[in-house]
Amino acid sequence: MSETEVITAPRPLLLGDGRPAGRAWSLDPDLRHLNHGSFGAVPLVAQERQELLRAEMERSPVVWFPALPQRIAGARVELAEFLRVDAGDLALVPNASAGASVVYAALTLRPGAEIVVTDHGYGAVTMGAERLARRWGGRVRTARVPLDADQDEAYEAVARELGDATGLVVVDQITSATARRLPVERIGAEARRHGIPVLVDAAHAPGLLAAPLADATYDFWTGNLHKWGCAPRGTAALVARGPLRDLLYPLIDSWAAGEPFPDRFDQQGTVDATAYLAAPTSLAFVESAWGWPAARRYMDDLADYGAHVIGGALAELTGVDCAVDLGMPVPGMRLVRLPDGLAADRIEADALRDRVAGELGVEAAFTSFDGVGYLRLSAHVYNTAADYEYFAEECVPVLGAWARENSGKRSAQ
Ligand SMILES: Cc1ncc(COP(=O)(O)O)c(C=O)c1O
């Protein structure tokens, strides 16, 4: 951004009846919700749809459960259309973590093989990779990708870790702690040239990216519909197109185990699958209220504005530029650098999240990367400029005081 560029707030989105968009959600009006990205938020209309489905299940379980696989297959068709993939390539799993676990459980033993991850990887998914590497008697190799790496640098950083010993690459399409993209298409193509399977952790991609699987050449991709897609929680996609997909089985052994991928994922013993069935309602709601392209534009413009006002307030307080160059930014998410003394590691970042929620009434995400703390903004359609202005005016001075307190304590130690 040039110094003269003016960042203005987008006009708040409204519902068809003129009420603010946020009225379509049940978020507590006494809190500020600046962290859609971590756990999503479900619009009332989808909550109601899920409640109706639950009531139907409770009225007649013996009719409900035998018919369930067919209904899940029907939901798959709608969700696949949203992601612009073939429903025959998409299995439903409860979350992106489960998608990764399915892949880890499927891969055949490669004694001594290495798993390449990046230092931006989601901790829990990387822990799964470490466990698999231990099973193989191999190890995890971590590609270091600088925060501001552009597409070429990020690609090179991962590509140079690939070799004869590599048994799997796990790479994020949109990273969690650093809210940036990685060039998964190029990494996937390079791995394919070496015959190495690739798992793309795309937990944040559905809803944020219009066609997250366009140009995909990787074997496995998993993404949450319960984040940016606002689906009821416990709804994620696992897309697999190559021959390795025949190895994929759901984590729960069930009666459809003899069916091909992805049909065998449509039956998972006796589980409450109403989230899967209600997920299309969330997608359709945003589409009919504003259209996904306009919703995405709004989220991106608002995240820009939020980073500008909060970054500006922090810079004024500390005298340090808080803008962050992410190399490959994503729509709707931004990082703002926190003052020294805050969120230097994940434990501190989580503690700060809890303190800000408890003492300041703001749900926010704090992350850390390379020992530096960040506020991660993720704006959805129910957010407005006032959310970020409030944070800048009310929370930034408090964060400044907490940072000084922590730095004082550290230097006294
Ligand atoms: C990159 C990434 N991977 C995986 C996950 C895990 O998602 P879930 O808890 O829905 O499995 C997240 C959650 O934030 C994430 O950001």
Image (tube, rainbow, N blue to C red):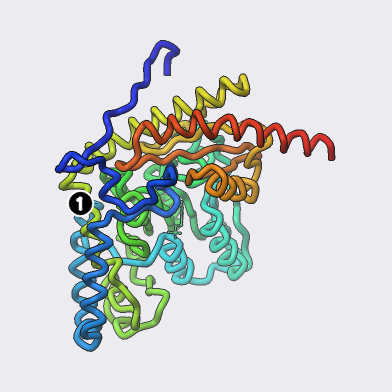
Q: Residue furthest top?
A: 4
Res. 245 visible in picture:
yes
Quarter of the image for residue 123 reads bottom right
Res. 187 visible in picture:
no
Q: Residue furthest right?
A: 413
Q: Is residue 111 above or below residue 162?
A: below
Residue type of the residue flagged with mark 1: Phe
- In the rendering, at what x and y percent does residue 289 appear? 18, 45
Q: Is residue 355 above or below residue 48?
A: above
- Crowding around mark 1 (Cα neighbors within 10 Å: few <14, some 14 to 19, many 20+) is some
Q: Quadrant of the N terminus?
A: top left
Q: Is residue 68 above or below residue 114?
A: below
Residue at image position (60%, 34%) is 398
- In the rendering, at what x and y percent does residue 412 appear? 84, 36
Judging depth in this view, the residue of 139 and 282 nearest the camera is: 282
Q: Quadrant of the C terminus?
A: top right
Residue at image position (19%, 60%) is 78
- In the rendering, at what x and y percent does residue 276 appear? 28, 66
Of helix, strand and loop, which one carries label 1?
A: helix
- In the rendering, at what x and y percent does residue 324 appear? 51, 29
Residue at image position (45%, 56%) is 196
Residue under circle 1?
285
Is 326 on the left or on the right of 352, as rendered?
left
Residue at image position (38%, 59%) is 220
